[in-house]
Image (tube, rainbow, N blue to C red):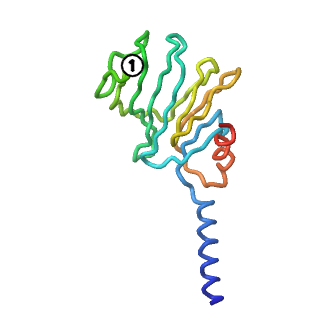
Amino acid sequence: MPRKRWWIGGTVAIMAIATVLYPWPWLAVREGSQWRYAFPGWEGTSFTLRWTHSVEKEDWEEWFEVTDGGAIEITGTRFKTFGAGVPASAGKETHLEDGWVVMTGIDRIVDPLAVQAAAAERYRMRYAGHMFALSHASPPPIYTFSIRRAPLWRILPALVRPWLSS
């Protein structure tokens, strides 16, 4: 019996060490070179950025997904009103839905994705059903979203930070 416990304990220890040391894919949200936030970034992972348009004063959303090649792709967007610089159509379908103009099937790689999260525009990120505030007071942060492979021990503060600040 002690030999069986040793094998089980050894196996658990090896799996724990491998989990901490193996470079997993992470959705990295960096401010400069610092990892501000990290979320699991497997193929098919999706997230949304939402903000208040500076001119229209209406919310705008863009939807993103991690591709099988490990890149970030914009898949769709929705907004309330057309204004300067807004395309008449993008992607495969444009339709109205509950007062929103919805464009889907955009499917364009935007990796890395850079966002200046000004406080007045109230940038938020939705990941796994949770909303995280990105904007803060001056100067507005410039975040870079990308998929990075890193071991758990290197990104642990960035992995915990969004849950502490929400």
Answer with left or right where residue 122 lies relative to residue 44: right
> 55 or 97, which is in the foreground?
97
Q: Residue at x 54, y 48 (%)?
A: 40
Residue at 65% x, 38% y is 36
Q: Residue at x 66, y 88 (%)?
A: 2
- Residue 5 at x, y percent in the picture: 63, 83
Judge whether 72 appears above or below 142 on screen.
Answer: below
Name the residue carrying label 1.
99
Q: Is residue 36 left or right of residue 41?
A: right
Image position, residue 68 (x, y; %): 40, 47
Which part of the image, by quadrant, shows the C terminus?
top right
Relative image position of residue 87 (x, y in whole percent): 37, 16
Circle 1 sits in a helix, a strand or a loop, which is it?
loop
> Relative to 108, does residue 100 appear above or below in the rendering?
above
Q: Amino acid at mark 1?
A: Gly
Judge whether 104 appears above or below 55 on screen: below
**Figure quadrant of residue 107:** top left
Q: Is residue 126 above or below residue 23?
A: above
Q: Position of residue 155 (x, y in %)?
A: 64, 48
Extreme residue toward the front, this view? 98
Residue at the image point whose x is 51% and y is 40% from the top: 129
